Amino acid sequence: MVKLNKQTTVTGVCALTVDGKEKQVAYMNATIPVGGTPNIGRSIQDVELFNTNKEEVLKDFAAFDEYIYSLMETEETKTAE
């Protein structure tokens, strides 16, 4: 018997322009299973850039979280239908 699981996966990056070049500071990912518990993760690639731009990076983290929560609401609505 085949058992299927549907989920939505989202990834994002926090990138900053430093000396005219774009540098990735952090990576974000989330998996939202339909009718299940979401999993949200973050990884900081450049600690020095993170520390000097912490406020901006945390804003990106918050924006990512808001987006994921909005998708969760959409997935819950789909499950209820």
Image (cartoon, rainbow, N blue to C red):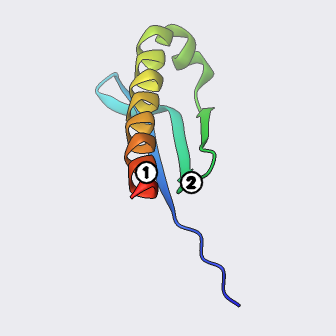
Quarter of the image with the C terminus in it: bottom left
Q: Nearer the viewer, residue 7 or 54?
A: 7
The residue most toward the left is: 20
Residue 29 % position (x, y): 54, 44
Q: Which amino acid type is shown beneath numbered disc 1? A: Glu
Total marks placed: 2
Task: Please tell me whether residue 61 is drawn above or below residue 81 in the rendered image.
Answer: above
Crowd rating for badge 2 (residues with CA inside 10 Å; few <14, some 14–19, many 20+): some
Residue identifier under label 1:
75
Pick out the residue farthest to the front. Answer: 81
- In the shown orientation, is residue 1 left or right of residue 79? right
Residue 30 lies, in percent from the top left, at 54, 45
Task: Specify the quadrant of the image occupied by residue 15.
Answer: top left
Label 2 amino acid? Gly
Q: Residue at x 48, y 16 (%)?
A: 58
Tell whether 47 sits left or right of 20: right
x and y, in percent, of residue 42 in the image: 60, 34
- The relative height of residue 4 versus residue 78 in the rendered view (above or below) is below
Q: Which mark is residue 35?
A: 2
Query: Which residue is pictured at 42% across the width and 32% down the height?
Result: 64
Quarter assignment of residue 13: top left
Name the residue furthest right: 1
Between 10 and 72, the residue placed more toward the observer is 72
Q: Position of residue 40 (x, y in %)?
A: 59, 38
Question: Decide: marks 2, 1 in contact (CB < 8 A)?
Answer: yes
